Image (tube, rainbow, N blue to C red):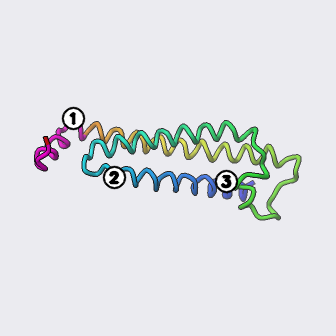
Amino acid sequence: MEEMRKAAFTSVARGCGFALLGILCVMVGFSFNPRLMFQSGGTLTLMTVLVLIMKARRALSSDYKHTEMWLILPENFRPPERYARWATATVMRDAYFTFAQYTALISIAMWLMALVIGLSGLASAYWTFQGAP
């Protein structure tokens, strides 16, 4: 079961890594406005949380043989077929929910940074210094 858990977390971490790469690219695109940068990052990570929760709910009904976790898992660690569906769904669901919690914390941190920047006036000082209207 521990090998299944490692494979599930590897699979979900890989997907979250690709999502993080996309989110960081968007944030760099908005780096001219720090408040907007953190707002967009917070919104996109919140969308990632929603996707992870939806995938966790679908883990119970998906075919375990077509999951990335099953493909990563070495043959000698795969459980018997009658047990595999339940074990795969349980492990994948746990991995999705764990990464959803961490991603939600990151989203909250980004929204708080946007709030601090907005309340402190750093964004307006930045725009005034740059000569923007």
Name the residue beneath numbered marker 2.
Answer: 29
Q: Main secondary structure of the magenta part?
A: helix
Could you tell me which secondary element the residue under label 1 belongs to? helix
Element type at mark 3: helix
Q: Quick one: label 1, few (<14), some, or many (20+) residues within 10 Å?
A: few
- At 34% from the left and 54% from the top, the residue drawn is 28
Q: Which numbered marker is on residue 103?
A: none
Circle nearer the N terminus (3, 2) = 3
- Residue 75 drawn at (x, y percent): 81, 64
Q: Is residue 131 left or right of residue 82?
A: left
Of label 2 and label 1, which has the lower sequence position? Answer: 2
Circles 3 and 1: CB distance less than 8 Å? Answer: no
Can you give x and y, in whole percent of width and height, for residue 41 in the image? 39, 45
Amino acid type for the residue under numbered disc 2: Gly
Which is nearer the eye, 111 or 33? 33
Q: Quadrant of residue 56?
A: top right
Please report the residue visible at 11 percent of the width from the left and 47 percent of the height from the top. Answer: 131
Distance from the alpha carbon under mark 2 to that under mark 1:
22 Å
Q: Between tags 2 and 1, which lies in front?
A: 2
- The amino acid marked with disc number 3 is Ala
Which image quadrant: the N terminus? bottom right
Question: Which residue is tagged 3?
Answer: 8
- Viewer-proximal residue, 121 or 1? 121
The residue stretch that appears in magenta: 117-132
Question: Which residue sits furthest front?
Answer: 133
